[in-house]
Image (spheres, rainbow, N blue to C red):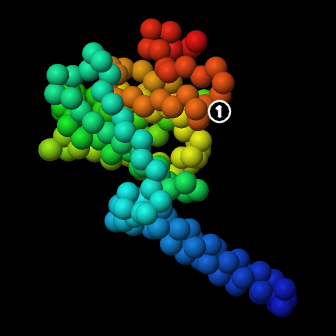
Amino acid sequence: MPTRASWRARVGVPVLAAAVLTGLGLGAARAFDVDRHRAEAAAVQRGPQVVTHELLPYPDGAARAPRGRLQHRPDGWLSVVTLRGLPPATGPERYLVFLRNWSGWALAGSVEAGAGGSAQVRFGAEPRARTVYEVVVTRDVDNAVNLPHGAPVLHWFDASLGPPRARPFDFAHPLS
């Protein structure tokens, strides 16, 4: 005959497992809610305290000059990088967005240009937006390497936000 404790264990474990799975399911739905992410990015872009940094084409970039901007709130985590005027990438190539702060480089995301040549990367992790002092956008295959690689497209650098000896990224000497 089962004891009262064993009965509780037989009933309690499945109930606890169901509760955990329900919580995980709700969290996953929120994490992958694309409409919510778009709304949060739009709120950052239209906010009264938005910080905007213009990304400019590299001197030897494409003839059709793309443009971009990094936007964030002063104390927010979400960075929004909006790209415009991008020519279509070929094959497995994507546009890669790299962010740099005092800790180093991070690959914020890779995107394909839409029909009008526009794309957006939303990044809500380290490096925190207010600590970023350089943004590099390239065109290459996304191999998950954090160091900028590929054909340079857009760039922004602000030495006043970086360490004293910070210099813009040099594709000829990427590890220097």
Q: Residue furthest top?
A: 172
**Residue at image point 77% right, 87% down:** 7
Q: Quadrant of the N terminus?
A: bottom right
Depth check: 120 or 17 in front?
120
Depth check: 57 or 136 in front?
57
**Residue type of the residue flagged with mark 1:** Ser
Q: Quadrant of the C terminus?
A: top right
Depth check: 121 or 76 in front?
76
Residue placed under numbered mark 1 in the picture: 103
**Label 1 SS:** loop
**Residue at image point 42% right, 59% down:** 44
As drawn, 69 above or below 59: below
Depth check: 12 or 140 in front?
140
As drawn, 70 above or below 41: above
Left or right of 114 on screen, residue 139: right
Total tally of numbered discs in the picture: 1
Left or right of 42 on screen, residue 123: right
Residue 72 on image: x %, y %: 47, 52
- How many residues crowd mark 1 within 10 Å: few (<14), some (14–19), many (20+)? few
**Residue at image point 49% right, 20% down:** 169
As drawn, 100 above or below 150: below
Residue 110 on image: x %, y %: 37, 38
Residue 43 on image: x %, y %: 40, 64
Asked whether the viewer can see residue 105, the reply is: no
**Residue at image point 46% right, 50% down:** 51
Q: In which image quadrant can residue 6 be found?
A: bottom right
Asked whether the viewer can see residue 5, the reply is: yes
Residue 84 on image: x %, y %: 24, 41
As drawn, 144 above or below 34: above
